């Protein structure tokens, strides 16, 4: 073996010693870089994995927000007069017209004619229920009242009433109703042979209809009977009985 090594020319030995040190130095400097390059994909993978998790978390959070909004929308039904008024529906309205006295429920006509002005604040207290044709919901209405009397003398009155109104469901924008209630009225009218008291009680009832020009705004028409008396506190107490013809507007929300 030694003899064979001795036979290698000296020039080859010199070339080997000249090349070997630079090769070792290159290997020492390149090995860490190669190792780092091999580790780079894993670092990139970790970085991409974290970004993917962040995007997924944001997507889920956004989807959860959309779902919650959709649930809230489903819990709060869209108002639709065709489907009737559900519990919690509010109503603001104003109506006016003409009242003409007559002999109904009294022995004689009082001769009192007036123009009423009613402001209404209503709240639906039940959901739609019942079979057709009585399917509907019940509404409670507070009604401040102003009355301008033209006969037998020109004067005025003011008061307030509490009414119950039943709104019928028709499946259209025509919503008929029937309401009735009691109230109190103060006026400065003296009718010596029929009613001679300033503070009186009222009873009113009658049918009407709302026509919705859009989902919230309605035109209101109504006819009704109106009674004024003092409840027997003073004499005479024949009372004033009238028919009313009313027109107004109402806003539901």
Image (cartoon, rainbow, N blue to C red):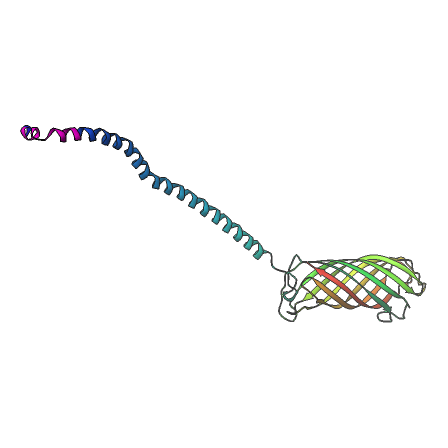
Q: Quadrant of the N terminus?
A: top left
Q: At which x and y percent is residue 151?
A: 92, 66
Q: Main secondary structure of the magenta part?
A: helix
Q: Quadrant of the C terminus?
A: bottom right
Q: Is residue 6 magenta?
A: yes
Q: At which x and y percent is residue 169?
A: 65, 67
Q: Nearer the viewer, residue 13 or 176?
A: 13
Q: Nearer the viewer, residue 219 or 233?
A: 219
- What number of labels is visible? 0
The picture quadrant where one finds residue 238 is bottom right
| Residue at the image position 51 percent from the left and 49 percent from the top | 62
| Residue at the image position 5 percent from the left and 28 percent from the top | 3
Relative to 82, 226 lies left or right: right
Q: Nearer the viewer, residue 44 or 235?
A: 44
| Residue at the image position 32 percent from the left and 36 percent from the top | 36
- Which region of the structure is painted magenta? 3-15
Q: At which x and y percent is residue 158?
A: 85, 57
Q: Nearer the viewer, residue 193 or 35?
A: 35
The picture quadrant where one finds residue 251 is bottom right
Q: At which x and y percent is residue 207?
A: 75, 68
């Amino acid at each position: 073996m030694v003899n064979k090594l001795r036979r290698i020319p000296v020039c080859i030995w010199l070339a080997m010693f000249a090349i070997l040190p630079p090769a070792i130095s290159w290997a020492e400097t390149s090995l860490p870089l190669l190792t780092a390059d091999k580790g780079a994909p894993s670092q990139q993978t970790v970085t991409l994995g974290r970004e993917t998790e962040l995007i997924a978390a944001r997507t889920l959070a956004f989807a959860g927000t959309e779902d919650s909004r959709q649930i809230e929308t489903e819990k709060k039904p869209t108002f639709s007069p065709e489907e009737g008024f559900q519990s919690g529906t509010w109503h603001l309205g104003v109506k006016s017209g003409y009242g003409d006295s007559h002999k109904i429920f009294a022995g004689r006509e009082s001769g009192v004619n007036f123009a009423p002005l009613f402001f209404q604040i209503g709240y639906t207290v039940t959901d739609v229920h019942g079979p057709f044709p009585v399917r509907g919901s019940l509404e409670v209405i507070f009604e401040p009242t102003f009355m301008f009397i033209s006969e037998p003398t020109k004067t005025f009155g003011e008061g307030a009433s509490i009414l119950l109104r039943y709104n019928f469901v028709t499946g259209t924008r025509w919503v008929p109703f029937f309401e009735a209630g009691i109230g109190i009225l103060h006026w400065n009218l003296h009718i010596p042979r029929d009613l001679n008291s300033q503070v009186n009680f009222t009873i009113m009832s009658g049918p009407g209809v709302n026509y919705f020009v859009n989902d919230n705004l309605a035109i209101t028409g109504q006819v009704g009977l109106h009674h004024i008396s003092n409840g027997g506190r003073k004499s005479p107490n024949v009372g004033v009985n009238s028919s009313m013809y009313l027109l107004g507007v109402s806003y539901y929300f």
